Amino acid sequence: MDLRYSAEDEAFRAEIRAWLEKEVPAHGPPPPPDDWPARRSYDTAWQRKLFDAGYAGLAWPAAFGGRGLPTSQQLVYLEEYARADAPYIGVNFVGMMHAGPTLIAEGTDEQRRFHLPRILRGDSVWCQGFSEPGAGSDLAALATRAERHGDHYLVSGQKIWSTRAHVADHCELLVRTDSEAPRHAGITWLILDMHQAGVEVRPMRTLDGESHFCELFLDGARVPVANRVGAENDGWRVTNVTLRFERGTAFAQHIITLRAQLRKLVARAVRGAGWESDAVRAKVGRLAASLDALWRLTQMCIAEAERSGAPSLVGSAVKLRYSELSQEVAELAMRLAGDPIIGRTDLDGLPTAAIVREYLWSLQYTIAAGTSQIQRNLIAERILGLPKGR
Ligand SMILES: Cc1cc2nc3c(=O)[nH]c(=O)nc-3n(C[C@H](O)[C@H](O)[C@H](O)COP(=O)(O)OP(=O)(O)OC[C@H]3O[C@@H](n4cnc5c(N)ncnc54)[C@H](O)[C@@H]3O)c2cc1C
C-alpha cells in the first residue's frame, strides 16, 4: 500500500481540522467519570454533531449511511481527531466499532435499515453480552439459553462484564440454542432490546471506584426471531466476524490517541526533572518507535478490512501490542509524576487524578476483548501455524 497522502487527502485534512477546531471547544468538557447518564448524553450529542456534519461512519459503506471514504482519508480523520483531543467515542464504541460493522456484514436488510441509522446518529447505544461467569476466554462454554417459541426466543441466563450496559438500548447477545450440539455449533447471535421485563442490569464497581461495566441477568427476555443475526446455531461464525472488528480496527482511534498522549507526556517531562534521566529518554524513544510501528500495522489492518470486508487475524497482534504499550505509557506517566500522585490532587498543571485514573484503567487492557494469552494463542496457531497447545 502507498502510505503517502494525496493532495485530496490533505484537502480533507484541512476541512476536518477546521471543523474540529471549532466544534471540540464548543462541546465543552466531559462530565464526571461516574455520572453515566451525563456521559451518555455527552457522547451521543457529540455523535449527533459528527453525523450532522457528515463525519459519522466514514468507513461504513454509503449504502448504509456512512461515507465510504478511502482508507487514506479514514486515517487522516483519525490523526486529526487525536490532534484535536476530540471526545472519546465512549458509549458509542460497541455500536460504531463492532455491532454496526457486524450488521453490515451479516445482518438482514431490515436489521440494517432499522439499526444502522440509529447507531450513526447516536440515538441507540449498544453493549456486548458475550462473557459469562463460566465463559470468558473459553467463550464457547457460554450457557445462557434461548428457547424458540414461534416467532420469538425466550432468553434466560447471566452475562458479566458488559461494558456500559447500564446506559445501553441494545445488546449483541450470544446464546445457546442447541445444548445437544458440539459447543461451537449450538450458539446464536441475537439483538436484545435492553428496555424490557426480564432484563436486569447491575453495575459493578471497579478498582478505580467507578462502574464501567455490569452484570446482566436475563429471565425470560423476549427476542423476536427477526432479531437473529445469521442462522440459528451459526452464531460462532458471526461472533468471529464481531471479534475481528473488535480486535482489528476498533482500536485504531485509541492507538493514534496513545501516540498523542506520549507526546504530551514528553512535553511535561521536558519541563520537569524527569527528562534528565537517560533511562527515561531511552524508554520514551522505544515507546515512540513501537507506537509508530503499531500505527503502520493498524493502517495495514484498516486497508485490509476495506479490501476484504472484515479485518484479518492480524488484529490480534494489533490488540496485543496496543494493550501492552498502553500499560507502559500509563506506568511511565505515574513514574514521571512522582510523589504528588499519592494525593491524587492536581498540582501545578500536573493532572495527577487523571494520571492515576488512567494507570488503574490501563490494567484492564490486557484482559478486555480477549486476554494477551489468548491473542498469543491465536497468533501462534492461526497466523504462524504452530501446533495447538494442550
Ligand atoms: C474492562 C473490561 C471490559 C469488558 N467488556 C466486556 C463486554 O462489554 N462484554 C463482554 O461480553 N465481555 C467483556 N469483558 C470480558 C472479557 O472479554 C473477559 O474478561 C476476557 O475474555 C477474559 O475472560 P475471563 O475474565 O473470564 O478470564 P479467564 O478466561 O478465566 O482467564 C483467566 C486467566 O487464564 C488465562 N487463560 C485462559 N484460557 C487460556 C488459554 N487457553 N491459554 C492460555 N491462557 C489462558 C487468561 O489469559 C487469564 O490470564 C470485559 C473485560 C474487561 C476487563
Image (cartoon, rainbow, N blue to C red):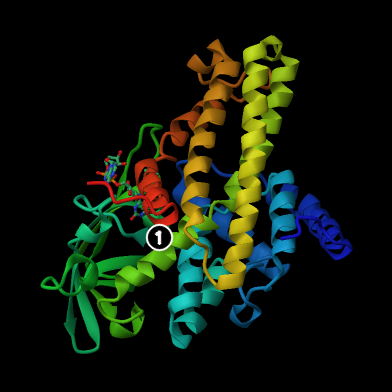
189 or 140: nearer the viewer = 140
Q: Quadrant of residue 283?
A: top right
Q: Of residues 77 and 6, which is closer to you in this image?
A: 6
Under mark 1, the amino acid is Cys
Horizontal and vertical percent position of residue 193: 35, 71
Q: Is residue 156 left or right of residue 75?
A: left
Say left or right for 254 vs 137. Answer: right
Counting from the top left corner in percent of width and height, residue 114 is at 48, 81
Where residue 40 sits in the image (x, y, percent)? 50, 55
Q: Residue drawn at (67%, 63%), measured in percent from left and top?
A: 50
* Residue at 42 percent of width and 34 percent of height: 363
Image quarter hosting the N terminus = bottom right
Q: Which residue is mark 1?
A: 127
Q: Is residue 169 visible?
A: no
Foreground: 59 or 225? 59
* Mark 1 CB within 8 Å of ligand 1: yes
